[in-house]
Amino acid sequence: MWDAALIAFDRFADPLHLAMLLAGVLAGTVIGILPGLGGIACVAILLPFIYTLDVHTAMILLVGSLAVVHTSDTITSVLIGAPGSAAAAATVLDGHPLAKQGQAARALSAAFLSSMIGGLIGTVFLTLSLPIARPLVLFFGSPELLMLCVLGLSFAGFLTGGAPLKGGLAACLGLLLGSVGSAPADAVNRYTFDQLYLLDGIPLVGVALGIFGIAEIIDLLAKGGRIAERISLGHGWLMGIKDVVQHWGIVVRGSLIGVWAGILPGIGATAGSWMSYGHVVAMARDREKFGKGDIRGVIGPESANNSVEAGDFIPTLLFGVPGGAPAAILLGALFFYGIQPGPRMVQENLDLIFTIIWSFAIANTIGAGLCFFLSPALARLTWIPFARLAPAIVVTIFFGAFQSTQSFGDIYAMLALGLLGWLMKQLGWPRAPFLVGFVLTKPTEQYLWLSISRYDFEWLLRPGVIVLGLLLLVSIVWIVRGRLANKSIPAEESSEGAVLLGKTPSVLFTFAVLVVVAAALYEAQSFPHLGAIFPMAATIPAVFMAAAQLIFELRADMPAPPPETRKKTKLALGYFISLAFYLVMILLFGFGIATAVFTFAFLYGLVGIRWTHASVYTAAMVSVALLMSWLLNLYWPEGMLLG
């Protein structure tokens, strides 16, 4: 095993691998600072650029970016009180008050060092889990792996704050979308509607960029980016380091809490951070200091959020069950290279596992160092209105969506899923279970087919299946008891629990979901036996959950949305129309002209900056986009009017 670790470490002597790691670290650092995006959007944006890389180089790039997001998102949380990602929300409680007291540098240095140590502790546990879990992984057969997938789907779906039914339905919708295309076990095309594009299914890039990338951009634009109050970083960098040394016990306990939250599928960094913060408060004798600028309230959650990501890799790599939404995207990237996480990966690709481990550890260290030395420069990014950054992000996302298969169908799907993701967020539907369900579709269906083919239905009586089934049952009972006791179970997207658009849109959306899953169930009955088993298994429980959710919403009292929400909704639809306009321009005039027109019109017409600045920005954006097309050998059609 350690030979594989040395082989993986030697890869970083290659300048290309080291450059990719640095590129990932820089991308993760910048994206982490932008409020609302976080690790999911970061990995999703970089995902399209791996298709010309080998698997080791691709993993170095993606893991390098993911390892530093929860380090740099602290800058936004401390300086302006707006979390760079959901996982940094707990840091705001004490980090921002410290910044208002002139101790921003102290809070930031303590957070950076805590995040780095937490990530390294998580990496150590990931490494130590290999010799312990390896025999267990090799013992598992297809029935046990199927139950692990079901367990991961259940955790991701139901551990969603106060909306377990919505989370379960989101996971089922992800499974249903993943079923589109040719069935792996039978000669049948499912839900393709005679469209050639859908025969191979919708690629992960379009789904991830739509559900999270486009949806977040529209939401941030509608909220209206504001220039942050320019808070001075002040002094106290060394004091923050001394605080971490003084409270080393909090760092260790927070890291261990984060690792445990990462191992449990579907929990995620948000829950790990809040669990660690709650633990610090509960253990303190002077609890009244928290929320007013206590450095312990920064050290606790920051030591947990990076260790969560390392813990996520344990179920993802060893059992093929993603610990969270970012890990689900990495899992999909491994599927692209034909690598099946689980027993086969442990046997045949152990060096790749260690490549991921080394990437995470080295990127953690480099990322923390960058944040230490570049904080004054990075802080200036928080002073820029998001609308000025949006065109560059939009162009990158469109570029990435087309890069995956070089089909305009990917962009159509991305925009449609972007609208769906925005609606889900506004109506309190968690999106992480949707993505996890989509990624787990292929392995779940594969294990289901293998289990039935080899064991008929006797696989349900295997000891491992029974144990995992009891674990699933206990988890469901625990969730129900928590709901009855009005206890909130934190989750990756617990912040998406509020219904912002009011009762009528919520009821209509749930009714539409019920119609979709019922129609999918009816259509599945016409498929051959092996092709129908999986979609029916996904849609039958979805029908009952959708009906129950609809009844709850009809009986619930929901406040009417305030005028401000209605205004934001209109703005969001307007921005979405601008993205559709960009797509139409690409179809008519090609990528270069469309990018120039969209960028200039957005900046000059919508944002209102000077035409000279908009022109320079536009020229730079078009030049970078065309350069990337040339470097990646990406062919864009010239447009119908120019071709």
Image (tube, rainbow, N blue to C red):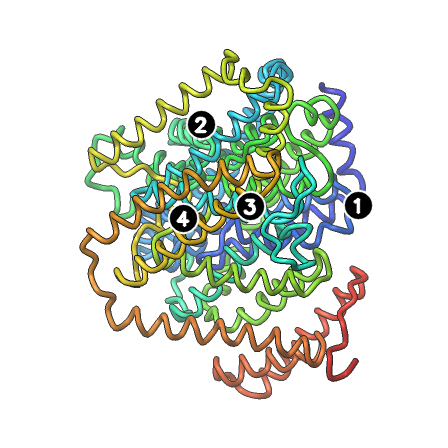
Mark 3 residue crowding within 10 angstroms, few (<14) / some (14–19) / many (20+): many
Residue under numbered circle 3: 68
Residue under numbered circle 1: 15
Q: Quadrant of residue 350?
A: top right
Q: Earlier in the sequence, mark 2 or mark 3?
A: 3
Pick the quarter of the image with the N terminus: top right
SS at circle 1? helix
Question: What is the number of the mark on residue 260?
Answer: 2
Q: What's the distance in space between the residues labelled 2 and 3, CA to CA?
A: 20 Å
Q: Earlier in the sequence, mark 2 or mark 1?
A: 1
Camera-near label (4 vs 3) is 4
Q: Residue at x 40, y 71 (%)?
A: 224
Residue under numbered circle 4: 430
Pick the quarter of the image with the C terminus: bottom right
Mark 4 residue crowding within 10 angstroms, few (<14) / some (14–19) / many (20+): many
Q: Position of residue 90 (x, y in %)?
A: 35, 45
Q: Earlier in the sequence, mark 3 or mark 1?
A: 1
Q: Earlier in the sequence, mark 4 or mark 3?
A: 3
Q: Residue at x 74, y 50 (%)?
A: 51
Q: What's the distance in space between the residues labelled 4 and 3, CA to CA?
A: 24 Å
SS at circle 3? helix
Camera-near label (2 vs 3) is 2
Camera-near label (4 vs 2) is 4
